Image: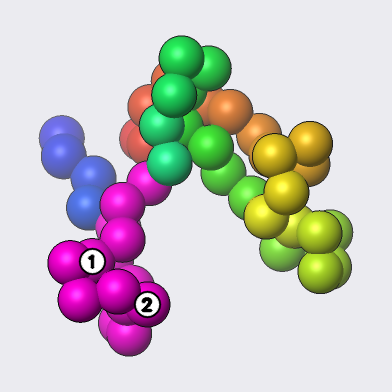
């Protein structure tokens, strides 16, 4: 099964893609307020499924 995540209004014309590095995909938790997107608050997962 393939997962596709898209923004309705991307911030750049080429589109936006999930952040991925050697730790896995970087996910943010909006419950953390203004700092939700900071790497120190990120959750890393192996897949998007």
Find residue 18 and report its horizontal and vertical position in percent: 38, 46
44 left or right, relative to 4: right
Please tell me which residue is depicted at 81% across the width and 59% down the height of the picture.
35
The range drawn in magenta is 5-18
Residue that numbered label 1 is attached to: 15
Query: What is the secondary structure assignment of the residue under circle 2?
Result: loop
Assign the magenta stretch its main secondary structure: loop
**Which corner quadrant of the image does residue 36 belong to?**
bottom right
**Which corner quadrant of the image does residue 13 belong to?**
bottom left
Asked if the stretch drawn in magenta spans residue 44, the answer is no
Find residue 24 and report its horizontal and vertical position in percent: 47, 22
Residue that numbered label 2 is attached to: 11
Please tell me which residue is depicted at 53% across the width and 17% down the height of the picture.
23
45 left or right, relative to 43: left
27 left or right, relative to 48: right
Asked if 45 appears above or below 7 in the picture, the reply is above
Query: What is the secondary structure assignment of the residue under circle 1?
Result: loop
Give the Cα distance between marks 1 and 2. 7 Å
**Which corner quadrant of the image does residue 48 belong to?**
top left
Please indicate, yes or no, whether residue 29 appears anywhere in the rendered image. no
| Furthest residue toward bottom | 9
Q: 10 Å neighbourhood of mark 1: few (<14), some, or many (≥20)?
A: few
Please tell me which residue is depicted at 78% across the width and 41% down the height of the picture.
41
Find residue 42 and report its horizontal and vertical position in percent: 69, 39
Please tell me which residue is depicted at 67% across the width and 55% down the height of the picture.
37
Asked if 23 appears above or below 41 in the picture, the reply is above
Q: 10 Å neighbourhood of mark 2: few (<14), some, or many (≥20)?
A: few
Query: 24 and 12: which one is in front?
Result: 12
Q: Quadrant of the N terminus?
A: top left
Q: Quadrant of the C terminus?
A: top left
Which colour style is shown? Answer: rainbow
> Disc count in the image?
2
């Amino acid at each position: 099964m393939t997962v596709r995540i898209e923004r309705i209004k991307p911030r750049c014309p080429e589109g936006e893609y999930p952040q991925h590095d050697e730790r896995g995909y970087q996910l943010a938790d909006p419950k953390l307020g203004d700092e939700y997107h900071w790497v120190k608050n990120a959750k890393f997962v192996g897949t998007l499924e």
